[in-house]
Image (cartoon, helix red, strand yellow):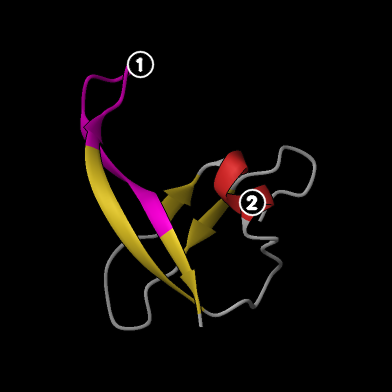
Amino acid sequence: MDSHKGYAFFKPDEFGDNIFIAPNLVTNNTLINGTRIQVTSEEYIDNRTNQPKFRVKKIKLL
C-alpha cells in the first residue's frame, strides 16, 4: 500500500500477479496493510501502454 498516494495492490492467496486497487476503493473500505478481503476484478486497457491489465472492481471485507 502506498499511503502517500492512496492506492494499493491485492495479493492473491493462491497464485497470480498483484492487482491494482484504486485510491477510492482503499479509502471507501478503510484498507490497511494486512486487511483480509475478497475482490472482484476486471480487465481493462492501460491508456499508456495499450496493454490489457487487471484492477479491483469490488471489495468485500472478510
Q: Which of 28 and 9 lies nearest the eye of the viewer?
A: 28
x%, y% of residue 6? Answer: 70, 43
The magenta stretch spans which residues?
Answer: 44-58
Question: Is 40 displayed left or right of 31 in the figure?
Answer: left
Residue placed under numbered mark 1 in the picture: 48
User: How far, Cα to Cα, is label 1 from label 2?
Assistant: 26 Å
Q: How crowded is mark 2: few (under 14 residues within 10 Å), some or many (20 or more)?
A: few
In the image, farthest residue toward the right: 4
Residue at 53% x, 42% y is 22
Q: The disc labelled 1 sits on which kind of residue?
A: Arg
Q: Which mark sits nearer the N-terminus, 1 or 2?
A: 2
Q: How many labels does the image show?
A: 2
Q: Give the mark toward the camera: 1 or 2.
A: 2
Q: Quadrant of residue 16?
A: bottom left
x%, y% of residue 14? Answer: 30, 83
x%, y% of residue 47? Answer: 32, 17
**14 over 56 or under it: above or below:** below
**16 over 36 or under it: above or below:** above
**31 over 54 or under it: above or below:** below
Question: Is 24 displayed left or right of 52 in the figure?
Answer: right
Residue placed under numbered mark 2 in the picture: 28
Q: Quadrant of residue 1?
A: bottom right
Q: The disc labelled 2 sits on which kind of residue?
A: Asn
Magenta: main secondary structure: strand
Q: Quadrant of residue 17?
A: bottom left
Residue at 24% x, 33% y is 44
x%, y% of residue 18? Answer: 40, 59
Is 20 colored magenta in this rendering? no
Q: Under tag 2, what secondary structure?
A: helix
Residue at 25% x, 47% y is 42
Label placed on residue 6: none
